[in-house]
Image: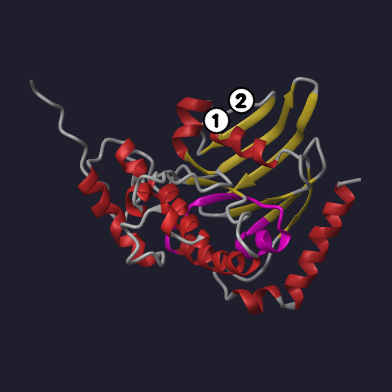
Amino acid sequence: MQTTPEAPAAEPHSISQPGLPADAGTALAIEGLEHSFGALRAIAGLDLAAGPREVLGIVGPSGCGKSTLLELIAGLREPTRGRIAVGGATAAAGERLARCAYMPQRDLLLPWLSAIDNAALALRNRGVRRDAARRATAPLFERFGLAGFEHSRPGELSGGMRQRVAFLRTLMAGKPVLLLDEPFASLDALTRGEMQEWLAGALVAEPRTVVLVTHDVEEALYLSDRVAVLSARPGRAVAEVSFSSPRARPRPPAITSPEFAGLRERALAALAEGSR
């Protein structure tokens, strides 16, 4: 019986899905977005946009629809009203989902797989054979500070290392838009700060259009080009702030600068106002 040959591995220095180059189709446009769960209005009249390779931070009070927004962008849900376009594509499962990689709050690593096999899972799902998927993924283990842990199981990794593997798995999906939902929420304060600085560098090394949802205003300001502040439910944009310095700057001097302190106060004031 003839068998269909498995797909070849992706080029390790070009993590993009065929037909979806990293330099194209990455812009995000959200216009008049509304979403309800029955009588409960989660999002109302939301307008947002992100350019190619831009990191857009989203902050807001609990229950304002931040995670729902990521699901809507990815095409996992259809909005009640309004328009979402990812690289010009507006259809949900057939188009937006093909352009987005979603990283939820929990790392969701498979405990029976090694770190490298967890990271290469997206390639395996595309039909790439295991050895080829490992070869494509291995160069990024050193770049992302995971060298030497390729064959460790998730239970043998620290929380920060597990998050790095989860982020690498998200990258290996080859999608031009990354949707990150509270990626460091479960980490202690010290590890969280270290991971923020690491992620800033990783997004320079492997740039994508990113929507980052977080409760942490400081995290959003440090990691993002722009930060949109949402109101209490139903979520709507009430303010936007941005830091003038480029991303991937050293964290301690950045978050203690007078400009950063002023932006943090502005964002916190907008959060307070929007929560009333």
Which label belongs to residue 119? none
- Name which residue lies at 71% across and 28% down: 35
The residue at the far left in this view is 1
| Nearer the observer, 141 or 174 | 141
Residue 84, placed above or below residue 237: above
Asked if residue 223 lies in the magenta stretch, the reply is yes
- Name which residue lies at 51% across and 48% down: 107
| Quadrant (top left, top right, bottom left, bottom right) of the C terminus | top right
Question: Alpha-carbon neighbours of circle 2 within 10 Å: few (<14), some, or many (≥20)?
Answer: some
> Mark 2: which secondary structure?
loop
The residue at the far right in this view is 276
Residue 252, visible in the rendered structure: yes
Q: Which residues are magenta?
A: 205-226
> Mark 1: which secondary structure?
loop
Residue 11, visible in the rendered structure: no
For this view, does 148 lie left or right of residue 157? left
Question: Alpha-carbon neighbours of circle 1 within 10 Å: few (<14), some, or many (≥20)?
Answer: many
**Position of residue 156 measured from the top left corner of the image (x, y, whole percent):** 42, 58
For this view, does 164 lie left or right of residue 220? left
What kind of residue is marked 1?
Answer: Gly
Question: Which residue is disc 2 drawn over?
Answer: 78
- Name which residue lies at 66% across and 26% down: 79
Asked if residue 244 lies in the magenta stretch, the reply is no
For this view, does 136 lie left or right of residue 35? left
For this view, does 107 lie left or right of residue 18? right
Tell how many labels: 2
The answer to whether the residue labelled 1 contacts the one labelled 2, judged by CB atoms less than 8 Å apart, is: yes
Question: Which residue is disc 1 drawn over?
Answer: 75
**Position of residue 152 measured from the top left corner of the image (x, y, whole percent):** 35, 57
Kindly report the distance in space between the C-alpha atoms of the residues bearing marks 1 and 2: 6 Å
| Quadrant (top left, top right, bottom left, bottom right) of the N terminus | top left
What kind of residue is marked 2?
Answer: Glu
